[in-house]
Amino acid sequence: MSFKKIEILERTLERERKARKAAEKILEEKSLELYNTSITLKKVNQQLENLLNEKTIQLQGVFENINDAYVVMDLFGNVLRMNDVAETLFGYDIGKESLNVTDLIYPEDYSYAMSSYKKLKEKGSFLDYTARIITKNNSVRWVQINSSIIYNKNKTPIGAQGVVRDITEIKILEEQKETILKELKNSNQELQEYAHIVSHDLKSPLRSINALISWIKSDNEGKLDDITLQNFDLIDTTLETMEKLISNILEYSSAGADTQKKEEVDLNKVLQNLKKVLFIPENIKISVLTPLPTIQGDFTKFQQLFQNFISNAIKFCDKENGIVEIDCREESKFYQFSIKDNGIGIEQKYHDKIFEVFHSLQKREDSSGIGLSIVKKIIDLYEGEIWLESQLNKGTTFYFTIKKN
């Protein structure tokens, strides 16, 4: 072999050695990088495992400590798991005995339960299913259930879970409430009928006395002296006051009763009608500042409401030129009305007392002290509030609200 060939071979071997060293270095670096990566992955996996164990323990705690019953079942209704609350509610221990949810269904609710289960399978969940169940000891309980389908990673249904709330006590209270409301309604109706009867019975002797006085005056015309005639006039006035008082009591007894009469009431027409019915002195001007709304309710009650406000304003006006201004503004959930006058005004200390029955600040023959009590009852009926602002000798503004339907 020639020297030249040997030289070429040595150069080739040298290049291979250098390439191998470079490859070994790259391999060493990549191995170290792979090792470091494996160490990092091992740490991350350990962290994930610790986190998973932690969440599993937390979920187990939630499962066991949730205040409502929690049930897991297969698609055939066989209960696979339930918490302590569920075991207490249903009376079953699934560690010792099998349980299918159909065993809990109250017979009369079976069709409802099956339709709800069908909805669960079709839509994946249902909310606020309310029905009765029968426990192991044959007691009947009312429950409310929210349920959803459980899917595997392929989104195939494999079971269902449900949160069951015992609402038996709530149902009992609701039934008691309905019974009380029914009894109260009957009682109110009986009281109204009784008030009408008593009103009629009380007015009859008053009319008889009034008739007797008229006959006596007629039979003795020209024979009675002035004092006797004055006494007879006083008796007439007293009889009129008593009859008005009886009428007002009857009106008050029926003011707060819900007649269930619902109609479209145009309050502008109510005011127009009142202007024709009420005696309005020439020195008093009644103004409606803005168009009034049309609301759902009983026409007669709204007429009573505005009639009492306006009558009071007229009655207690001491000015040469009296004003009564009616206004309204609409809010999101209610209407707010105001009735303003320039009458005698009301002292602050009486602002609450004036809504009490028979409480009149001035003893007048034409004031029974019931008008504002009627107003308060009607406003309460329509879930409103009433208040006032007033200055002595300057006037009063009553404000009240009526809830929108």
Image: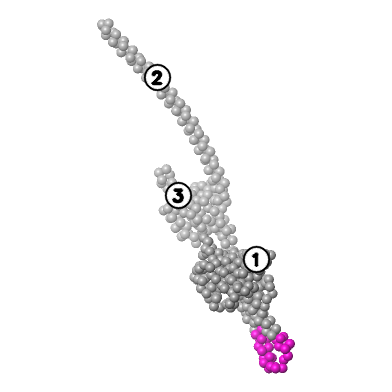
Residue 403 % position (x, y): 54, 64
Amino acid bearing label 2? Lys
Q: Secondary structure at mark 3?
A: strand
Query: Is 192 on the left-hand or right-hand side of 297?
Result: right
Residue at x 52%, y 63% (from the top left corner): 330
Within the magenta stretch, is there residue 253? no
The residue wearing badge 2 is 25
Residue at x 66%, y 83% (from the top left corner): 206
Q: Nearer the viewer, mark 1 or mark 3?
A: 1
The residue wearing badge 3 is 149
The residue wearing badge 1 is 391
Here the colouring is one colour
Nearest the camera: 40 or 301?
301
Look at the image and tell me in which quarter the N terminus lies: top left
Q: Secondary structure at mark 1?
A: strand
Residue 312 % position (x, y): 62, 72
Q: Nearer the viewer, mark 2 or mark 3?
A: 2
Q: Which residues are magenta?
A: 206-232
Sequence-wise, the earlier of marks 2 and 1 is 2
Nearest the camera: 67 or 27?
27
